[in-house]
């Protein structure tokens, strides 16, 4: 698998977001962002930016996981 130029780690919980920022503090090709996948405005502007989306321990906590998955899918 080829190494990617840029990665993004996203989290909505402030405690986990802080831990992610500390973990990747000295990793310039990893951007850490606060994103709540259930808020459409948080996902706005991210269309066509990724070739892969990986969700870990997330979908089971969403009110409408189908809507979130559709928002991550290519048009």
Image (cartoon, grey):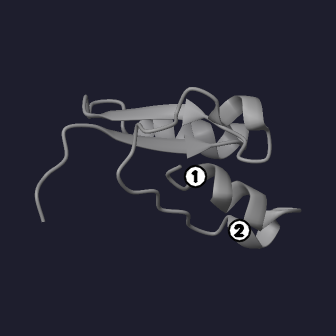
Give 19 or 58, whichever is nearer the viewer.
58
Quadrant into which the N terminus falls: bottom left
Horizontal side of residue 69 vs 31, given as left or right:
right
Mark number, residue 19: none
x and y percent of residue 56 in the render?
A: 56, 67
Give 56 or 50, whichever is nearer the viewer.
50
Q: How many marks?
A: 2
Badge 1 element = helix
Horizontal side of residue 62 vs 1, given as left or right:
right
Please tell me which residue is depicted at 36% across the width and 30% down the height of the picture: 25
Q: Check the image and report above or below for 72 versus 1.
A: above
The residue that disc 1 covers is 72
The residue that disc 2 covers is 59
Please tell me which residue is depicted at 84% across the width and 63% down the height of the picture: 64
x and y percent of residue 26 in the render?
A: 27, 30
Residue at mark 2 to residue at mark 1: CA–CA distance: 12 Å
x and y percent of residue 63 in the render?
A: 89, 62
Residue most toward the front? 75
Mark toward the start of the polypeptide (2 vs 1): 2
Please tell me which residue is depicted at 79% across the width and 38% down the height of the picture: 39
Dividing the picture into quadrants, the one containing residue 60 is bottom right
Horizontal side of residue 44 vs 48, given as left or right:
right
x and y percent of residue 71 in the render?
A: 65, 50
| Other-residue count near label 1 (Cα within 10 Å), few / some / many at <14 / 14–19 / ≥20 | some
| Other-residue count near label 2 (Cα within 10 Å), few / some / many at <14 / 14–19 / ≥20 | some
Badge 2 element = helix
């Amino acid at each position: 698998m080829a190494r990617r130029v840029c990665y993004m780690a996203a989290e909505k919980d402030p405690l986990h977001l802080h831990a992610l920022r500390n973990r990747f503090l000295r990793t310039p090709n990893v951007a850490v962002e606060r994103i709540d996948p259930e808020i459409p405005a948080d996902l706005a502007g991210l269309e066509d930016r990724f070739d892969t989306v990986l969700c870990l321990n997330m979908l089971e906590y969403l009110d409408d996981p189908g809507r979130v998955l559709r928002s991550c899918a290519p048009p």
